[in-house]
Image: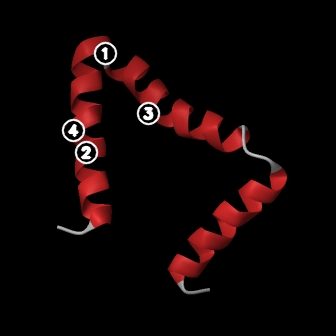
Amino acid sequence: MSKRAGVAAAGVLAAIVLFGLVGFWAGLLVLIGVPAAAYLLLDPSQRRRVRDLSRRELGR
């Protein structure tokens, strides 16, 4: 299994556990809100690097 597939599988497992513990909407808020908050806490130069990395992976 590739590294990316392992991360995806872990995310799905975490979502199932979180939905079971706190409910669907609270779990969805955590799963979307935590990465969004982490991105917003980055400096502008760090955000640019993250965007450039994702563009490079897409082949742009």
Q: Name the residue carrying label 3.
A: 31
Where in the figure is residue 46, as x and y percent of width and height? 74, 56
Dot 1 alpha-carbon crowd within 10 angstroms: few under 14, some 14 to 19, many 20 or more: few
User: Which residue is located at x 62 percent, y 38 percent?
Assistant: 38
23 or 9, nearer to the observer: 9
Quick check: 46 left or right of 35?
Answer: right
Q: Considering only order in the chain, which callout, 3 or 2, is on the residue closer to the N terminus?
A: 2
Residue type (three-letter) at the residue carrying disc 2: Ala
User: Mark 1 against mark 2, which lies toward the viewer?
Assistant: 2
Residue type (three-letter) at the residue carrying disc 4: Leu
Q: Name the residue carrying label 1.
A: 23
Dot 2 falls on a residue whose secondary structure is: helix
For the residues labelled 4 and 2, say whether their Cβ atoms are less than 8 Å apart.
yes
For the residues labelled 3 and 1, say whether their Cβ atoms are less than 8 Å apart.
no
Instruction: Pick out the residue farthest to the left.
Output: 1
Q: CA distance from mark 4 to mark 3?
A: 12 Å
Tell me: residue 12, above or below residue 52.
Answer: above
Quadrant of the image containing the N terminus = bottom left
Q: Name the residue carrying label 4.
A: 13
What label does residue 10 carry, if any? 2
